[in-house]
Amino acid sequence: MNSHKQVIASVSLLAVAAAVGVFFLLSGERSAGEGASAARSATEVRRQGGSSGRDMAQRRRVRSETAIDVADAPGRGAVADDDEYRSLSSEMRRIIADLQDSLDAEDRRSLSRICDKLSKIRRERGYGAVPAVVRAKAVEAIGLFLPDSLAELAEFMDDPEPEVVESAFDQLDILLNDTTIGDNRLSDMLVSMSKVLVNEDAIDSMALSVDINMRNSVKVRTLSQMLDAGTEPVVEKIRETIANTLEVEVEELPANSELVKQQLAEWLAENPDGEDDPEFYKGVED
């Protein structure tokens, strides 16, 4: 009986020893695996330049030598490092990156802040303080948000750089030929634009849009408001448009704007809107 008990005790001890052995074996493998994972993670971080003090020092030195100070947000560095922008100051490269971000995110508020910043730089340091390539990028971004960004676009209509002006006109033409914009909204936008516009080509495009893209009642209202609010070049062109509408020579128009507006009102009484005009000119947004 005692021998039988001794055998059972021996078997129990062997089972416990085996279990302990398995436990330590598994623990060792898990520790080794964790160590390997940690090593791989550290290696990956170093490859990405995130943990090595030497790599950090090299990046700081390169940044100092090349005068690049662009945030490390995804995509920003790629834009700022474009060959077209390499010669720009760090400030202008940041603005380029910000403009691209506003395009990518379709962020209207961000674009407004950037345009305000560019306007301030031009006022304080001169128009040329913002390089043409940055102004062109601004026009590209502004075009995405038309018609809401029309006021910002107008600032570039008289740019000294032909490529910037051409880009701005392309954006304006797209807007003026956008049939989804109703004539009432188009009128409000063009009246606001007339207050600052001085570029002859842009004024011609604007006057043509008033002439062909509005029902008569909206056209008369728009021309009258531009006579009161427009810049001198705008008023001169609008008087030509009015003369064509009234089928008279410009020289025959009264010098007094109130008398001209009275003649427009009389013309409208004789040429009221057609029955289908409200539906035809309303666009899809009115």
Image: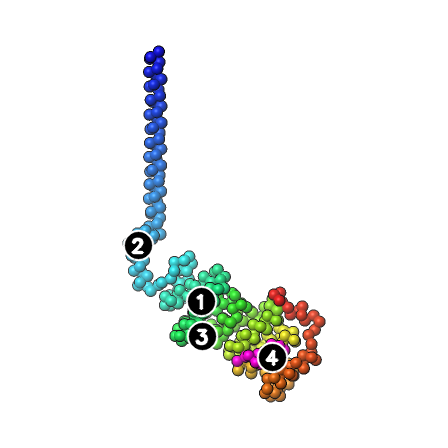
Q: Residues within 10 Å of mark 4 (few under 14, many from 20)?
A: many
Place residue 73 in its image quadrant: bottom left
Camera-side residue of 84 and 32: 32
Q: Considering the image in quadrants, where does the N terminus appear?
A: top left
User: Circle 2 sits in a helix, a strand or a loop, which is it?
Assistant: helix
Q: Find disc 3 in the rendering and name its residue.
A: 161
Q: Residues within 10 Å of mark 2 (few under 14, many from 20)?
A: some
Q: Earlier in the sequence, mark 2 or mark 1?
A: 2
Q: Earlier in the sequence, mark 4 or mark 1?
A: 1
| Amino acid type indicated by mark 3 | Glu
| Amino acid type indicated by mark 1 | Ile
Rounded to the nearest angstrom, the CA distance separating label 3 from label 1 is 20 Å
Place residue 227 in its image quadrant: bottom right
Q: Earlier in the sequence, mark 3 or mark 1?
A: 1
Q: Position of residue 76 (x, y in %)?
A: 41, 60
Q: Position of residue 77 (x, y in %)?
A: 39, 60
Q: Is residue 250 left or right of residue 134?
A: right
Report the span colored magenta.
Answer: 220-231
Rounded to the nearest angstrom, the CA distance separating label 4 from label 1 is 34 Å
Is 130 in the magenta?
Answer: no
Q: Find disc 4 in the rendering and name its residue.
A: 224
Q: Residues within 10 Å of mark 3 (few under 14, many from 20)?
A: some
Camera-side residue of 251 and 219: 219
Q: Find disc 1 in the rendering and name its residue.
A: 114
Q: Find disc 2 in the rendering and name its residue.
A: 55
